[in-house]
Amino acid sequence: ELKVEQNPLFLSMQEGKNYTIYCNYSTTSDRLYWYRQDPGKSLESLFVLLSNGAVKQEGRLMASLDTKARLSTLHITAAVHDLSATYFCAVVLLGTDKLIFGTGTRLQVFP
Amino acid sequence: NAGVMQNPRHLVRRRGQEARLRCSPVKGHSHVYWYRQLPEEGLKFMVYLQKENIIDESGMPKERFSAEFPKEGPSILRIQQVVRGDSAAYFCASSRAGPKATNEKLFFGSGTQLSVL
């Protein structure tokens, strides 16, 4: 059974600071996604990571994937209030069509 | 260019009633997925459908829950004889091709919040 764990679960950080969210998964997969969810809203796709060593960046967010370690990171650079949301990683269970989600990291950025 | 449309946004039912949740995928998308989210938790896969076919329903309870995606019209998630434990947010997602396709993204709807009294 594929398990996806994120840490931390809650993150309160000051504007301008940097931080990293971690996503570990338990079995082999060939793709990993990062999503953002605002309260009461839908999920917004941020990144799709397909290969070992993949790195993608969009604005203040950068995601990377290490398939050997079964680890993805979402790095936040110089946080701003607009980044406050819950961030989910999700992994496709190999050989299936299922996307398995982590429990999410609730990020709060304060002045 | 409408995204995934779900309705209703909020649905209140009493125990024992039926709940019908609707999902219209992005135009041109033939793959639909339903997920359930409990408070403070991630999304849990329920069912994956292509037009007129259920591909994977391994995440859906065998009793009381059913899903369809007819040739015409929206996908429907139906919950019969609802119980309080069914209270959750139900999200629908769609894609042009299946998740095995490289680089394929899922587009999510805004969800239906089901509350069972």
Image (cartoon, coloured by chain):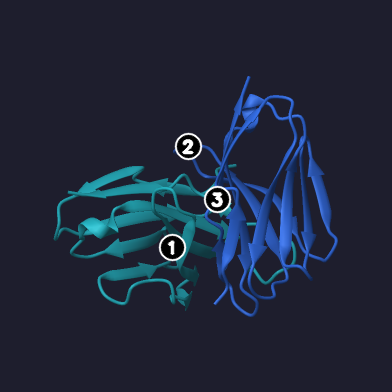
Chain colours: A blue, B cyan
Q: Position of residue A64 (x, y in %)?
A: 79, 54
Whether residue B13 is situated above or below residue A80 in the rendered picture:
below
The label on residue B72 is: 1
For mark 1, give the secondary structure.
loop
* Eye-nearest disc, 1 or 2: 2
At x 51% / y 63%, what residue is drawn? B32
Front one among A24 and B15: A24
At x 81% / y 49%, what residue is drawn? A56
Q: Position of residue A70 (x, y in %)?
A: 72, 67
Circle 1 residues within 10 Å: few <14, some 14–19, many ≥20: few
At x 14% / y 61%, what residue is drawn? B16
- Label 3, on which residue? A104
- Label 2, on which residue? A39
Circle 2 residues within 10 Å: few <14, some 14–19, many ≥20: few
Chain to which the residue tagged by mark 3 belongs = A
Q: Does any portion of residue B86 appear in the rendered image? A: yes
Three-letter code for the amino acid on which mark 3 is drawn: Gly
For mark 2, give the secondary structure.
loop
Using the numbered discs, state the Cα–Cα distance from disc 1 to disc 2 in whole angstroms.
32 Å
Using the numbered discs, state the Cα–Cα distance from disc 2 to disc 3 in whole angstroms.
13 Å
- Which of the two labelled residues, at mark 2 and mark 3, occupies the earlier sequence position? 2
Q: Position of residue B14 (x, y in %)?
A: 15, 52
Front one among A74 and A48: A74
Chain to which the residue tagged by mark 2 belongs = A
Q: Are marks 2 and 3 in contact (CB under 8 Å)?
A: no
